Image: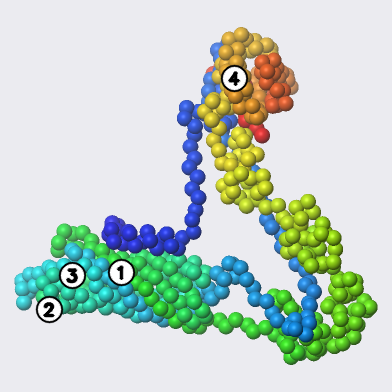
Amino acid sequence: MKLSPHFSTAALLIAALSLPSQSLAAEGPAEGGLSIGGSASVDSENGAAADGDAAAQGDAAAQGDAAAQGDAAAQGDAAGAGKTKKKSGAGAWFRKWRPTRNMLEVGIYGGILIPSAEHELYEPMGNVPPYGHQPFASVAPDIGLRIGFYPLSFLGIEAEGGVMPTSTQDGQSAVLYTFRGHGILQAPFRIAPFARVGFGMMGASTSSIGSDIDPALSFGGGLKFFINRWIALRLDVVDSVSARLLIDNGRSHNVEVLLGLTVTLLRKKEKEPIDSDGDGLYDPGQGLDVEDQCPSEPGPRENNGCPLGDRDGDGVLDPDDKCPDNPGPVENQGCPLVDSDGDGLYDPGQPVAAEEIDDCPNEPGPRENKGCPEKDTDGDGILDKDDKCIPDPETENGYQDEDGCPDTPPAKLSKFSGTIKGIFFDVDKDTIKSKSFKTLDNAVAVLKEFKDQRVEISGHTDADGSRDHNVDLSRRRAEAVKKYLVDKGIDSGRIETVGHGPDKPIADNKTKKGKAQNRRIEFKLIK
């Protein structure tokens, strides 16, 4: 379906206002390079043949923040210790007044219509009087009513109708009108971007080009803002598409930009806090910072809703005991030292040394991080404190895997990963032939250029002979390649070796060609 320029511009504006930004990481192989983990054969007489690439994989360690719960000590005084503290933060604000299930919306809207210049809302020539096509004014006011029902917080159906007074090209008055139904998919938050699609009718009544009504497909999107429990503001951009049969067998696009006011009905009422004993302090377990320590026994506010006494037997009388049901030291006004997240460090405000205070009292974390969890936002196994590319996860390919950044090995380095062509050995020996030196010297140069890169050298054989012999031969050949590189100045600690023998064939061991492909040396980039 071809979109009108008017609708495309308006839709881009809505998308920019309502959609969260996203980071897009472009990926591609380095020019001229090979991907990691390829394969080729090593033949004592005929050389090595390449046979494709294998993708290196790594598991990203997912880490989550553990939320520990603890009993908060209630505190009160005569100046107003019983006040409750409202939940704050962006998350709570976005959840406040968000859409709920089985909610009804009734609203009005106003805006503008940009009608198609090639509409078919007219009576053809030949009727009486002699009507014909004329475009409407380029912009018309648009007013209407809508009603919607949402069986789910994110999904609903709506019906709406509107009128658009305008004029034709010859200056005669005209009235356009529309009525339609559509489905709507929205984000279940206080600020809710949405998309809509549906079907309806669009008509015109004029004195100069007659009257007509056509079916129209409508689609679009917008944004809702729920001001409070009852009222919401709404912005829509809608394109009504109808067939254009008489003009050129095409489509006409009629774009509307609408600002509306909505009344929400049937929304579930939030529960009021419970105060069982009627002493002005609310019962525990309702997410309030100050709670009634004796919910079934009325007591003064300054004693946290409990009768006077020393119920916890800690030696601090209830009127002076900030935690009369939980024994605690006098230094802490009768309250126990609080460690809400159970990580061994105490919540702020406790009478302990500074190094014993928890900077993140609701999230367990190590002492060396002051009680805060060490996070891994992008889940790549590299903690944020060491990750240089948050929120983009590390590419596990053996190249700079410790920095937390997505990356592709340079072409020079990729050339020496996978099966290495041009490495030859004497038959059934680990002696490297001299014609292999040029290839190995090139590998030395690359490893010297990338001084921090580590590699694994693996040897492989065909299936002739015993497995134990072939595993030992492949290991010795890998060690021979390592020795050559070390003798040329490469740190031995950067190189690991392994012999797989016949265990990882890449071709058929029943053919001469397949056996030649299976005899090979592979390099793999590692951390």
Tag nearer the camera, 4 or 2 = 4
Q: Earlier in the sequence, mark 3 or mark 1?
A: 3
Residue 90 x/y as whole percent: 58, 67
| Gap in angstroms between the C-alphas marked 3 and 1 | 14 Å
Amino acid at pointer 4 = Ala
Q: Earlier in the sequence, mark 4 or mark 3?
A: 3
Q: Looking at this view, is 222 or 59 the one in front?
A: 222
| Gap in angstroms between the C-alphas marked 1 and 2 | 24 Å
Amino acid at pointer 2 = Ser
- Residue 50 visible here: yes
Residue beneath the point at 16% across and 78% down: 173
| Gap in angstroms between the C-alphas marked 1 and 4 | 65 Å
Relative horizontal placement of residue 3, taking residue 248 as reference (left or right)? right
| Gap in angstroms between the C-alphas marked 4 and 3 | 74 Å
Q: In which image quadrant can residue 58 be found?
A: top right
The residue labelled by disc 3 is 136
For the residue carrying disc 3, how many other residues have a C-alpha within 10 Å: few (<14), some (14-19), or many (20+)? Answer: many
Q: Earlier in the sequence, mark 3 or mark 2?
A: 3
The residue labelled by disc 1 is 256
Residue beneath the point at 52% across and 80% down: 229
Residue 519 x/y as whole percent: 61, 20
| Gap in angstroms between the C-alphas marked 3 and 2 | 13 Å
The residue labelled by disc 4 is 445
Q: Earlier in the sequence, mark 1 or mark 2?
A: 2
Give the quadrant of the C terminus.
top right
Residue 202 x/y as whole percent: 25, 73
Q: Earlier in the sequence, mark 1 or mark 4?
A: 1
Residue beneath the point at 56% across and 19% down: 421
Residue 286 x/y as whole percent: 70, 78
Q: Which mark is residue 207?
A: 2
Amino acid at pointer 1 = Glu
Relative horizontal placement of residue 325, taking residue 168 as reference (left or right)? right
